[in-house]
Structure formats: structure tokens, C-alpha cells
Amino acid sequence: MRIIVTNCNTTGQMTEEIVRGARAAAGPGTTVAGLTPTWGPESAEGWLDSYLSAAAVLDALRTYDGPAYDAVVLAGFGEHGREGVRESVDVPVVDITEAAAHLACLLGRRYGVVTTLDRSCGLIEDSLETAGVARNCAAVVGTGLGVLDLAQDQARTESAFLAAAERAREAGAEVLVLGCAGMTGLHRAVGEKLGMPVVDGVGAAVRLAESLVGLGLTTSRAGGYARPLPKRRVWGRPAG
């Protein structure tokens, strides 16, 4: 089985970190490859970045010419684009936001999301609402760290996460979700200290993608995710 994991930004180092986390979660016989958009924001933090990254990821998948893949994991927490990708490809598409929330709902009555900057909280809340899992979300809490700050100082990242996690717990969270693909792997460092389950969206999405492929299931074409209508579409700036 081959899974493509798409980064939502153009930072190759982050793609490598995400792929490492995805491979650690994958079962035997699963190959994981990363896909980095060639254009778009270097980090996705806000509405403008999110819409740009959605188009860039769609374009990266549209122009992909590597080995065939069996599933796509979208590694952008709260970012746009998952519905468009589901229309576009003929394999299961699992978004880390949905995957983490669904698994969290199996572990406790209410979950909390700990993310990066506060400006990302609204995006994530909307994404959870669209996915139908917002009802069980107690809080979406920011750490105050930018996406590219996460890998710079592990001690600072862990400290900021723990402080935000306490706020989520006070709001009623019984399970925590890592609210950024760049946090992949952090659950191992903070889970014991918090005394509550911490769900990594990348690992959750990889395992769910494996399950869908193993069960022979893929996106329904019977309604909203029907294949795009045939028409002329111009990608990027027209020549001339």
C-alpha cells in the first residue's frame, strides 16, 4: 500500500518531519511518500494562506507523475481543500483534522485542540463544524507559536503546549488533539505529563487511510463528491 501525504505549505523540512511521523504510525507493508507544493505559503496561518495552500495542494496532486498511490492524507490541520481533493482523486482522502477528531471522540466525551497562533482557531473551528465533529469539541486553544517556530526550540514548544493544554482541560476536554501537522510526534513527549490521551492527526489519518484501503472503500460518487464536471479550467495565470 502506498500513501501520499501532502504538506499544506512549501517548507520541505516540514514535509520531511510529517513523513517521519506518518511512517512511524504506518503498518507493515505501507509506503509513505511526501508531496510538497511548488507554490503557495511557506506556512499556513490564516484564511489567505489556507485558500492559497488548498489550490496549491490540488495543483500538486493534479500534476503528480510519480508512482501510483492508494490513498491521500492531507496534512494541514483546519486547512481548506479536502472536499476538492475528494472530487479530484479516485482513492480515499483522509484529512488530519477529521481523523484526529473522530479518534478523539472514541476516547472521551469531549476533546480539545491545541494549535499554533490564535488566528488559526477560527479556521479549525469551521473545519470541525464542516466535518460534523464540532459538537464534541470543548475548546480550540492557541499556543502563541508560529508554525515555523515549532521545530526551533523543543523545550519552548513543549512548555507552550502544556500551558495551552491546561486551558483546554479547564474548558472540559478529556482528550487532546495536536492542532498542527508540525506538532507530529509531540504526543509522545506530553501525553504522560498530562495524564490524558493525546491524538496526533498525522498518525490517525495514516491508520484510517490504511483501514479504508484494506476494506476496499473509497469516496462516494453518488452526490456531493461526484467527479468534477468536464469543462475548460485554467490553472495559474493565462499566457499573454
Image (cartoon, rainbow, N blue to C red):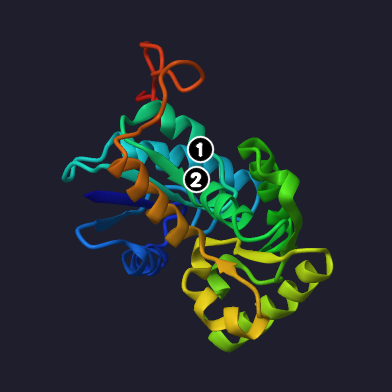
Can residue 115 be seen in this snapshot? no
Which element type, helix, strand or loop, lies under badge 1? loop
Query: Where 186 falls versus 100 (above or below)?
Result: below
Q: Which residue is mark 1?
A: 81
Percent position of residue 103, x then y: 55, 55
Query: Where 171 falls versus 87 (above or below)?
Result: below
Which corner quadrant of the image does residue 164 belong to? bottom right
Contact between marks 1 and 2 (CB within 8 A): the answer is yes
The answer to which of marks 1 and 2 sits earlier in the sequence is: 2
Residue at 23% from the left image edge and 43% from the top image edge: 69
Percent position of residue 202, x then y: 45, 59
Residue type indicated by callout 2: Ser
Nearer the observer, 109 or 117: 109
The mark found on residue 53 in the picture is 2
Residue at 38% from the left image edge and 19% from the top image edge: 227
Measured Cα–Cα span from mark 1 to mark 2: 8 Å
Residue at 71% from the left image edge and 47% from the top image edge: 125
Residue type indicated by callout 1: Gly
Can residue 102 be seen in this snapshot? yes
Percent position of residue 219, x then y: 40, 29
Which corner quadrant of the image does residue 80 belong to? top right
